[in-house]
Image (tube, helix red, strand yellow):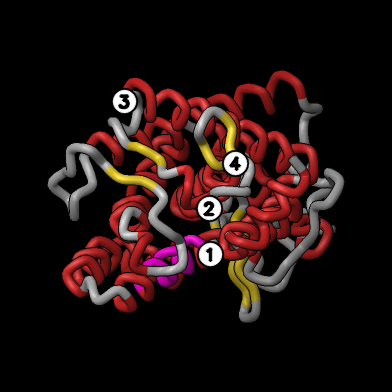
Amino acid sequence: MLIEIFNGVINRPYVFIFLATFAFIGITHLGLYRWLLFLVVGTLVAFVCEASSIRNGFPFGIYTYHPESFEGELSILGVPYWDCLSFSFLTYFSYTIALVLYSPLYKTRGDLQVLDTKEIRRSPRVLITAALFMMMIDTVTDPVSHQGSKWFLGDLYHYPSPGAHFDVPMANYLGWYFVGITTLVIYTTLELVFLESADGSEKGTRWLPFHGILGSLVYLGVYGFMFGVSIYIEDYQLAIASTFIYVLPVAMMVALLLRPGSQATPAEIAAYLDDFPNSPVARRYFRDGPYSGPAAPRKTEVS
């Protein structure tokens, strides 16, 4: 088994580069144990859904793996293990985008942090939006991946009944939404029930410059990687369609980050400090409370 796992690492280095990035950003954001919980939940949900779908079509629709394309690599019930891992980090990166959209932002000349409270992290709007971004990334990855015979991924699978979107069935995209929302609901529930309440000092948490948008940038990096592959395999229609899918949300994200009104108010900073008083961001910027720090708003803004 260890040799098969190692073969997967050697043959699919891009998966493990993204996985390592997920580990770095996720641990410094959530802490080691919450990151491990996210990884395990995301991987298991993906495995169950893939093992189900290749047999009965739920939730991705019917598709067929080609075992000869990953011979010598670990697969369980016909599902390659590294493919399940990819769902966990794509869900997390989608989750970080939703947190940016719905959380107060703390911006200084050389930094940007997302003040995501516990309520925001578990809110239905964040989970639903994250699952939508999860589905959205697959509108780029799957049309490229199922043409794996044209690039180094390999001819991994095919759809017996090709769909309307570059031969990908619509059920597949709905399946990605299902995996995303299921992973996030299970993770937030287990995190609340079984892990001690976080205060920001969890093992592994660190301050990083622009920490709040690192996951979003990696998400866009996945898109950029797949866009590059679509150009490489000369599927220019797919490249153009993928670009149009992303232009509006990226423009909206940039506008949000640059908008002066997105700066956290003292009340929003205080709410963050109530939840995470010992977080790296709190220790760095708010040692004297919500009115301290280089970008602190005026006290008169508090009603």
Between the C-alphas of marks 1 and 3, the distance is 30 Å
Residue 136, compared with residue 44, is above or below; it is: below
- What mark, if any, has residue 139 been given in the picture? none
Label 3: element kind? loop
Residue 297 visible in the displayed image: no
Between the C-alphas of marks 1 and 4, the distance is 22 Å
The residues colored magenta run: 218-227
Residue 108, compared with residue 165, is above or below; it is: below
Image x and y of residue 240, in percent: 20, 71
View extreme (left): residue: 164
Residue plotted at (48% across, 54% down): 97
Q: Quadrant of residue 36?
A: top right
Nearer to us: label 4 or label 2: 4
Residue under label 1: 218
Kindly identify the amino acid type of the residue bearing the numbered disc 3: Gly
Image x and y of residue 13, in percent: 62, 64
Q: Are marks 1 and 2 in contact (CB under 8 Å)?
A: yes
Q: Is residue 136 magenta?
A: no
Between the C-alphas of marks 2 and 3, the distance is 26 Å
Question: For this rendering, which residue is in front, 131 or 208?
Answer: 131
Residue under label 4: 81
Kindly identify the amino acid type of the residue bearing the numbered disc 4: Tyr
Residue under label 2: 93
Between the C-alphas of marks 1 and 2, the distance is 7 Å
Q: Is residue 220 magenta?
A: yes
Residue under label 3: 57
Question: For this rendering, which residue is in front, 214 or 287?
Answer: 214
